[in-house]
Amino acid sequence: GNPNLKPEKSDNINLGLYYAFSLSKSHNFSFNVNGVYRYSADFIYTRLNNNQDKLILDNRNGVSTWGADAEIRYSYKNWLTAGTTMTYQFLRNLQKYEEGYNAVSPVYLDQMPNIPYLFGNGDINLSFKDVGKKGNNLSLGYNLLYVHAFWLYWPSFGFSDDTKNVVPDQLSHDLNLVYSLAKGRYNIGLEAKNITDEILYDNFSLQKPRRAFYLNLRYFFNKNNKY
């Protein structure tokens, strides 16, 4: 907790472009591109305390963000969809002076640490109707997640060739299966996370759980099948 935490205020400029078209009744495409500029006063971020043993929330007196994201999606009839999204964001510290320094802060104009700046994902989903019996549907999905290496500490306090100062590249693969019966009254879901058992990290280089499997069972007591 931080009782001195102030609410964040920001000014934003956003610009987006969306375009969709079809090559035929079966092949559909869409493109989405967005750009953003944001200036945040009292920017709220998470940092380690002085003892490096606890995460606390704090304010930075000025952070600018330049960013863009792009998405491409494709669908074939009613049974195949695929897409990919990439995001780039550059967050720069604009707090020129801070407690403990008599001169300009050594991290002034630094890239904000513990925040990924380049990341994306891709997915492919297949849908099949009347599998095994009329009214039973099967969905198969694959997801890819990528996070580019980013700073663990302030860049001015480390060197780019020192791997201890960065969170490394991350790439993971997920699979999922959902089988619905009786027009959706019963649902069985299977999910495999990080199937290649890669070492993944959070924003502070703490290791995430490795490969994992999930089983979800769902039943609707009152299912309206009119729509």
Image (cartoon, grey):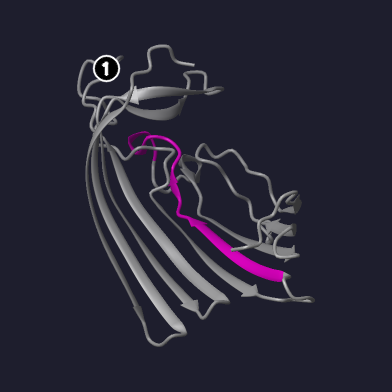
Above/below status of 192 relative to 24: above
* Residue type at the position of mark 1: Tyr
Q: Quadrant of residue 208?
A: top right
Relative to 197, 101 lies left or right: left
Q: Residue furthest right?
A: 132
Relative to 179, 107 lies left or right: left
Above/below status of 192 relative to 76: above
Label 1 SS: loop
Percent from the top left, x then y, of residue 116? 42, 46
The quarter of the rendered structure image containing the C terminus is bottom right
Percent from the top left, x then y, of residue 133? 78, 75
Percent from the top left, x then y, of residue 119? 44, 55
Q: Residue at x 71, y 53 (%)?
A: 211
Q: Residue furthest front?
A: 226
> Magenta segment range?
137-158
Q: Quadrant of residue 138?
A: bottom right
Seen from the viewer's position, the closer of residues 29 and 201 is: 29
Relative to 183, 64 lies left or right: left
Q: Residue at x 55, y 63 (%)?
A: 144
Seen from the viewer's position, the closer of residues 136 and 99 is: 136
Q: Quadrant of residue 63?
A: top left
Q: Residues within 10 Å of mark 1 (few under 14, many from 20)?
A: few
Q: How many marks?
A: 1
Relative to 121, 24 lies left or right: left
Percent from the top left, x then y, of residue 194? 66, 57
Q: Which residue is mark 1?
A: 101
Seen from the viewer's position, the closer of residues 102 and 145 is: 145
The reply to whether the magenta stretch includes residue 138 is yes
